[in-house]
Amino acid sequence: MFDAKLRSVMAPGCNLAGRNLARLGLRPMALTAVGFVVGVGACVSVARRLWMVALILWVVNRIFDGLDGAVARAWGTSESGALLDITADFIVYGGFIVGLAIADPSARLACTVLLLAYYVSGAAFLALSSLLERRGSPADDERSLRFSGGLAEGSETIVVYILFCLLPSQIIPIAWGFSVAVFITAIQRIVHGVHVLHPRPELEVSNLADAQTTSPR
């Protein structure tokens, strides 16, 4: 919900840091790899109930996730880099929730529902991004994928995961509440996708007229 505003505020500083890191010879793939390892460490720390360690590693993972994109823009973005970046993000997002389910067995149902919400929202997001790319729709920003907004985006996920670490006794209500937010986001993305992708009636009539004109008699 707040991603676009935060990006507009943080983009100048993040892009400057990305250019400086690129001048030092750092490659975005290296930052993605290091960030992924740190993120996996956060997931393992959650499972072992090392909450403060998990909190620090989670924040570091998010910093690397922001920097690898900035460095990629300095070097020139690549589709393979975008693929690995989003895959690493999804693994860490899901792995963190699996870690919570291991740490607190009573939270397994809430964590499972949250993972289902991620699955639905992620499917809608990736499908819409792919279809908009195939249509040649202009991108809203410099990122490789077409991101569709919603109630629960990256910034909200960062805050919720921090709350998991700071309030481990409240994992269940936090997970249920965030599941609702993610499901709402999935619905928003589906509705938006149907609206954007649904052919307009005037285009259908035009295409039918063209087909009748060009069809053999």
Image (cartoon, rainbow, N blue to C red):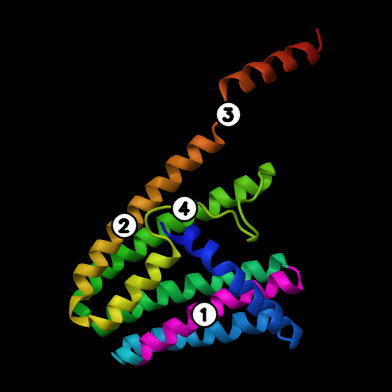
Dot 3 crowding, Cα within 10 Å, few <14, some 14–19, many 20+? few
Predominant SS along the magenta part: helix
Query: Disc 1 marks which residue?
Result: 63
Q: Nearer the viewer, residue 99 or 72?
A: 72
Dot 4 crowding, Cα within 10 Å, few <14, some 14–19, many 20+? some
- The magenta span reads 53-76
Magenta-span inclusion, residue 40 = no
| Residue 166 higher or lower than 177, as above or below | below
Viewer-side label of 3, 4: 4
Tag 2: amino acid: Ala
Residue at 51% across / 72% down in the picture? 89
Query: Disc 3 marks which residue?
Result: 199
> Marks 1/4: CA distance?
21 Å
Q: Is residue 158 left or right of residue 171?
A: right
Residue 181's disc is 2
Viewer-side label of 1, 2: 1
> Marks 3/4: CA distance?
22 Å
